[in-house]
Amino acid sequence: MSTYSIAVLAGDGIGSEVTAEALRVVDTAASLVGGLDIETEAIAASAVQWQQTGVAITDDQFDRCAAASAMYMGAIGLPEALHEDGTEVAGDVIFKLRFDLDLYAGVRPVKSYPGVPSLLAHGDDIDYIVVRENVEGLYASRGAGVNVRDEIATDTIVITRVGTEKVVRKAFALAAERAGTREFSRVTCVDKANVLASYAFFRKVFDEIGTEFPETEKERVYVDAMTLYQVQRPQSFDVVVAENMFGDIISDLSAGTVGGLGLASSGDIGDTHGLFQPAHGSAPTIAGQNIANPSAAILSGSLMLSWLGQQHDDDKAREAGRLIDVAVADALVSAENRTVDLRGTASTTDAGEAVIRRLHELSAQ
Ligand code: ATP
């Protein structure tokens, strides 16, 4: 029996609603596969905690996150929870975990699902992964930008050789893992190498690391063109790697092409720690109504199991993750299993229940 401890930061707004469904699904998949014991510990770090105590995440909460086998987050942040300089309190939690635990790769799968309405005329067969550099780039300046007499403001972009090599290698490793299951194996580097020296360096390191992976095609795209291609030819991507801010932007756009943020899962992954969370925020306007889409949260649970499987060479954990992916895809085909954002009729709990039903059917086959 493999035992995994999960630090669960359900967070604010819809965070607790989608987390409840994700954990139910993870638990069900684990018990159907057998040999897996998933133990959860609730961590109250959140914008609400900041409103009540002035601290979004305490040192003790951080230590408990760091000690867990994996971290799972619902959504942290509230529009009114802002520091004096206007930055969001949510960053105190997410950036602390990302930077202090070196979760350098933001892995964000982008996948179209049969039955889910697309905004694109040709929105079928989209299946790629955005790998966002998570701890450098422009966001490395968070909390350290300079405002000179309210006349000039600057933030500095940080690109290091070591950081770029790590995230680029991660992108190529993911492409290699997917190679057998796809018609092509390709890593696309997204940058603005034609304008800024920092991005030209990012691309140079990408080219250098790329020589270690002769089996994989390399593509280089400027970020402005990338947003066009994500709409015009999203099927041509396999794995995409980008600097922190560019990765942030293109991953939200990619979510929009496959049904919205309610389907966008993510993992913030380092060499020793992993944090898994839906890419959406706390969506306070729909919180407390049992209407939020739990799919992104559930798929993030599957990413977590797959990552645990890889870290611990545990086939059972990998199998539980794979089962969840199939069950979500199957459930989404019917409008009665989809929430309103995907033109369905299900509540949050109905949608979670549909995935659980499908998991039982799959394991009985
Ligand atoms: P953050 O900056 O914290 O990521 P955001 O500004 O991106 O947050 P979200 O909270 O993600 O905002 O919400 C953006 C929009 O997407 C809102 O209209 C929200 O209702 C919708 N939305 C987000 N998540 C979901 C979900 N799981 N189900 C349905 N709608 C969602």
Image (spheres, grey):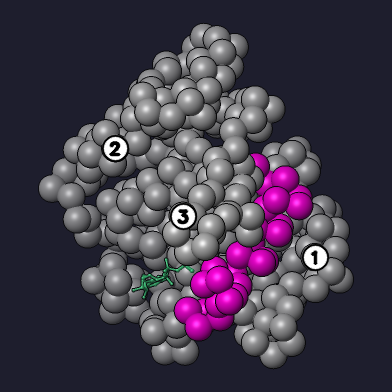
Q: From the viewer's perspective, is the residue at label 1 or at label 3 nearer?
A: 3
Spatial distance from mark 1 to mark 2, Cα to Cα? 37 Å
* Residue under pointer 1: 62
Residue density around tag 3, few if under 14, some if 14–19, many if 20 or more, within 10 Å: few
Label 3 or label 2, whichever lies nearer to me, is 3
Chain-order first, disc 1 or disc 2 = 1
Q: Position of residue 257 (x, y in %)?
A: 27, 51
Q: Which residue is disc 3 drawn over?
A: 152
Q: Would residue 335 be found to the left or right of residue 197 on screen?
A: left
The residue labelled by disc 2 is 224
Magenta run includes residue 81 = yes
| Closer-to-camera residue (323/43) | 43
Q: Which residues make up the magenta segment? A: 78-104
Lower sequence index among marks 3 and 2: 3
Residue 145 drawn at (x, y percent): 58, 54
Query: Which quarter of the rendered picture does the N terminus lie within?
Result: bottom right
Label 1: element kind = helix
| The one of 225 and 20 positioned closer to us in this rendering | 225
- The residue under the point 39% across, 83% down is 286
Neighbor class of circle 2 (other Cα within 10 Å; few <14, some 14-19, many 20+) is few
Foreground pick, 139 / 110? 139
Specify the amino acid type for callout 1. Phe
Kindly tell me whether residue 235 is visible in this rendering.
Answer: no
Displayed-image quarter of ligand 1:
bottom left
Q: Amino acid at mark 3?
A: Ile
**Residue 96 spot, x, y in % from top left:** 71, 59
